[in-house]
Amino acid sequence: MYNTTSDLAEDKLLLLYLLEKIKLPISNNKITQIILENNFINYFSLQQYITELLNSNFIDTIEQEGKNRIVISDNGLKVLSLFRNRISENKIKAIDAYLDNQLDDIKKEISVYAEYTIEGNNYIVNLKTLEKNYILIDIKLNVATNKQAQDLCAKWKKNSSDLYKKLLQVLIDD
């Protein structure tokens, strides 16, 4: 599958580099999306590397809002600092360029929650925004229809920052 073990090591170091650059807990799905969009590693090898990095304590999983997220560990940061030069400059440039274009969207996706559940005849919409693992706002609303619940979730995901500011202003104004 690989010509040398250096290819395998470079791929694992690339994952550590990605996690270090993002600086946020991130889902396995999001890591997979980033890696596959850039054609760095195939899906099955990627999942194997993530498992191996977890088992080696180079990355950790944390639970955030009921979802597992991946972060680089202190051991992973040490390994990356020692062996970063083994990642090809082309791959580093590609990751850096991707993150320059996508990091705001990634942060928004990670820190903005909008979900709803059905309780009896009502829909309970939970809207939440985090910043650096601190809750900025957490609102639960009871709405009558599925469409209202879906619309609220979509609006919150699209404009949570503006809606938060407006809501805060309404609550603060006399």
Image: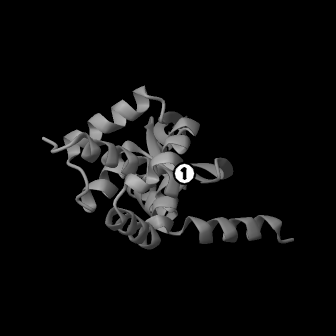
Q: Residues within 10 Å of mark 1 (few under 14, many from 20)?
A: some
Instruction: Please determine whether, in this image, residue 79 is positioned above or below residue 89.
Output: above
Secondary element under disc 1, as helix, strand or loop, is: loop
Instruction: Please determine whether, in this image, residue 39 is positioned above or below residue 4.
Output: below
Instruction: Please determine whether, in this image, residue 57 is positioned above or below residue 33.
Output: above
Left or right: residue 157 versus residue 74 is left
Total labels: the figure holds: 1
What amino acid is labelled 1 in the image? Leu
**Of 99 and 92, the residue lying toward us:** 92
- Say which residue label 1 marks: 24
Residue 152 seen: no
Q: Image quadrant for the C terminus? A: bottom right
What sort of colour scheme is used for the picture?
one colour
Left or right: residue 129 versus residue 156 is right
Residue at 35%, 37% in the rendered image: 50
Left or right: residue 28 versus residue 124 is left
